[in-house]
Image (cartoon, helix red, strand yellow):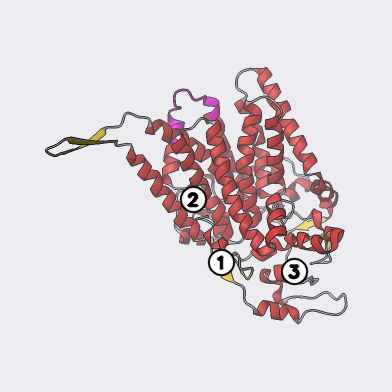
Amino acid sequence: MLVGAPYLNLDPEVIPTGREFPSHVQSHHMWTRAATCGLCALWNGTSQGGAPMLVDVHGSMLHPYVVISTVLFGVINGTKITVIASLMTAGFGQWWLANQLHIGRIARVWTSLAAIAGGHLAGRMENGVLGVVIATASCAIALPALFAVVQQRGNRPIVLAAVAIYFVASAGQGYIQIGFTLLLPLFFILAEKTFDDLRVAIIRVSTTVLISLLLFGIFLVPFLHFYPQFYKDVDPTIKSGQRYLFSFLNFVIDDPQFFRVDALGKLPFPNLYTTFIGIVPVAFALSTLYIVPEGRSPAIVIFLALYAGMAVWISTGTPLLYVATVLPFRGVTDFVASIRYPTYISGLAVQPILALAGIGFQRMYAFHWPQFVIELANTARKTRLGFSSNVILILLIASNIGAEVVFASKWTQTARQDPGFHEVLRRFRTDSLQWVGPPFGEHFWSEIATGMNLKMYQGVRPWKWA
C-alpha cells in the first residue's frame, strides 16, 4: 500500500502517468462490454478494422486480477487495484520461496518487502507497461510453485503450479512469458539425487505445463490460429539489449537520471532497465555464492544463481540473436526480430537474487556477534540491558528498503486527465458506422475512445494484419 499509494486515489479521471498506459488497458473494456451486450465482447471493433478480442496479447484482459477488478471498479480504477495486487503477489511469492528454502523469519520478511519495492515492478510503470508488471509478479508465484512440484510429491503442487502458470500466461505482452519458458529447464537441476528423480521431475513439470496450457486454451487456440497473419514492428538487431555485465549494474543504481540517458549501452527509456534492489541484497547474495551455508544443498544455490544469471543473459538479446543465426528460417528470424524489448526479462532475476540474499543474511545474522551490556545502577538495585550487535544488520536492510521505496516513488506517479480529451472525442461521434481518426493517433486517446465505443481508423495496437 505504501509503494502503490498514488494508485489508491480511485478517481477514474486520475490515471498513471506512463505514456502508453491508456493503450495497454484499452482491451480491458472487454468486460465493460460483456456486462452490456454479452458475446459481442469477443469482437474488438475499436481499432484498425477490428479483430477477435482473444487473439491480442497486448492486453491483460484474461488475467484474474484484471477480470475481477474491472468488473468491480471499472477499467481505470480496476487497473490501479491490479497494480497494488501485483505488488502484493510479488511479496507473497518471495515469502513463499523463502519459506520453502527454510529461510528465517526476519530474512523472509525482508526479502518479501524488497521484492514489493523493487524497481523491476514500479519502474515499469514509467511507461505504463501494465502487462509486464502483472507478468513479473505472476512469475513470482510460479517459481516457488514449480519448485514445490520438483521437490515434493502429490498432486496438489501440480495443480497450484498450473494455476500459477495460467496467471503468467494471461498477463499479456509476451516478453516475460518468453523468458520464463526459456528458464523452465533449469528446474530439473533441483532433481539432484538419482536419474529416477530426474525422470519423475520431467514428468511432473511436463504435466503441470500441459494442464496450464489446457487452462489457457481459450486464448492459445485463437492466437495460434491467427499468428501467421500478424505483422509486428521488428528490430533484427535488438538495439535495446544491454551488454551482460552492464545489465547487473541496474540492480544497484538508483539515480533516475541515469536511466534517462543512453549510458552503458542503454536506450533512454527507463522502464526497459529499472531493476534496482540495492547493494545490500546483492552483497548478501554474492556471499552465498562464495560459501554455501552449512545444511544447504549446492543444487539449490546453483539453481538460483543460474536462474538469475540466465534471466539477465536472455534480457541482453544475445541468445535470441544466436538462435536466429543458427536457425536462419524466416519464421524463426521474424519471431526473434519481433522481440524488440527483451530487457524486461531481467526482472525475473530479482526473485532468485533476493532468495540468495535471504540465505546469506540468515547465515550472517546467526554469527556469534559481540554483546553490548548497559548497566544502570542506583541505591536499590542494578538494571542490566543487553543486546547483540547484529542489530546493525537490521538497520542495514531497513535502510535498503527505504532506498527502494524512494526509487519506486519516482515512477508510480499519477495525473488528472485533461477534460478536453472527452470534449474532442465527443465531436468525433457520428450517426453512421464511420471510422474516426483521433489527432495524431496518440496513446492518450485510446482508452477514452474505446470506452465511448468509437471505431478508430488508427488506434494504438502493436501489431497489424499482414
Query: Residue 81, percent across and down?
Result: 62, 57
- Label ID, residue 96: none
Residue type at numbered disc 1: Thr
Does 89 sit left or right of 162 as displayed?
Answer: left
Q: Image quadrant of residue 12?
A: bottom right
Q: Can residue 440 be seen from the camera position used here?
A: yes
Residue that label 2 marks: 276
Residue at image location 38% in from the left, 33% down from the top:
364
Which of the two discs, 1 and 2, labels the residue nearer the N terminus?
Answer: 2
Residue that label 3 marks: 451
Q: What element carries label 3?
A: helix
Q: Can residue 305 be seen from the camera position used here?
A: no
Instruction: Based on the picture, tell me whether residue 137 belongs to the magenta stretch.
Output: no
Mark 1 to mark 2 CA distance (whole Å): 21 Å
Residue type at numbered disc 3: Gly
Quarter of the image with the C terminus is: bottom right
Mark 1 to mark 3 CA distance (whole Å): 20 Å
Q: Give the extent of the magenta segment.
A: 286-300
CB under 8 Å between callouts 1 and 2? no
In the current view of this chain or complex, which residue is farthest to the front? 380
Residue at image location 74% in from the left, 71% down from the top:
449
**Label 3 crowd bin: few (<14), some (14–19), many (20+), radius 10 Å:** some
CB under 8 Å between callouts 1 and 3? no
Residue at image location 65% in from the left, 49% down from the top:
135
* Foreground of the two, 233 or 225: 225
Query: Residue 23, percent across and down?
Result: 69, 64
* Foreground of the two, 196 or 388: 388
Mark 3 to mark 2 CA distance (whole Å): 36 Å
Q: Image quadrant of residue 361?
A: top left
Judge whether 121 appears above or below 394 on screen: below
